[in-house]
Image: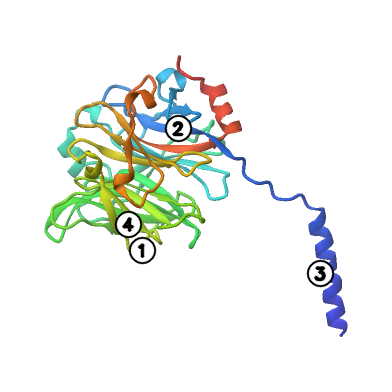
Amino acid sequence: MLLDAKKRVLLTFMAAVMATLPAKAEPAPHTGYLLVHFTSEVADGEQIYFSTSTDGLHWRDLNDSRPVLVSDIGEKGVRDPAIVRSANGDKFYILATDLRIESGKGWDAAVHRGSTSLIIFESTDLLNWSAPRKVDIAGGIPGAGCAWAPEAIYDDSTGEYIVYWATTSPLNGIDKARIYYSTTRDFVSFTPARLYIDRPGKADIIDTQIVKMDDSAGGYKYYRASGDGQITLEGSQKILGEWTTIGDLRSVGLTGKQVEGPILYKFNGTDQWALWVDQYAAGKGYLSLVSSDLSRAENFRILSPAEYSMGKSKKRHGSILSVSAREYQALQSKWGPSR
């Protein structure tokens, strides 16, 4: 009885203390967007550029269309950047391909004898970024020739980030691009690379991106888009679980011979999604599509040129982060929109 009384006193005390603590602040609503990207194979084109938007459709370049971040390590170029907000919102990471084609090395060397490292930048506020650091993420894959187009997504079932990318290497007698993954909690230490996605036969797969649906959304919990000869859409309940093929963009008239580098993102405060695809064959940069239902590829609608604007610079394979009004304004204050 005495022990029970002590417990009641302790619980009463703890409840009183908790009542005096300020409630945990809810994250500020996201009202804008930040796009990180590269532009082309020219002197400064393979570096990190920033652009912003208030509606996710009309974009303006920051920093007078000049690079915001530059890599002076590895191959001294950064392509295909992905930006990630940490699970608790206190950090941001940019992961990018360690590659510079403008140096003249050529695509064959880049694919088969390129860097097996990623370049990573880190920030607490989107404004002040660390120096780039190089992480050899694919060096343990036998015969690895590259590590391209990295992405990352937080797995709330394990408390880890799953980092995934494309590596070209020989496996089972076939030398081609496959998607590998590693896990990390801090973007400093990574587990050994493991095979993630392998298409049948000699088909390469590159440029995979995974998005998580809201908990209240029906259908699959995760969707992914990949370049595997087409732009293929898949759905799953688990990031590392079984995935079901939904379809590809041939249903709306786009083939893998025309477009690559998909970006999926949700419009803030709506149930609408956007899918950007890089019109690499025509050298035109991004084309924008929209849908309110990712479970059917044919639901995507290609926007007309009058419905969106990509800004002044050409935008190549990048990543889009939803930001708060405060974060958006801070980005404008530091780098200003390009006029």
The CA span between labels 1 and 3 is 42 Å
Secondary element at image label 3: helix
Residue annotated with mark 3: 11
Among all residues in the image, which is located at the extreme bottom?
1
Query: What residue do we see at 15% from left, 38% from top?
Result: 108
The CA span between labels 2 and 4 is 34 Å
Residue annotated with mark 1: 241
The CA span between labels 1 and 2 is 31 Å
Q: Earlier in the sequence, mark 3 or mark 4?
A: 3
Secondary element at image label 2: loop
Name the residue type under label 4: Ala
Residue annotated with mark 4: 193
Name the residue type under label 2: Gly
Residue 183 position within the rendered picture, expressed as x and y whole percent measured from the top left: 41, 56
Marks 1 and 2 close (CB-CB < 8 Å): no
How many numbered marks have been drawn onto this rendered protein structure? 4
Q: Earlier in the sequence, mark 1 or mark 2?
A: 2
Q: Is residue 164 visible in the rendered structure shown here? A: no
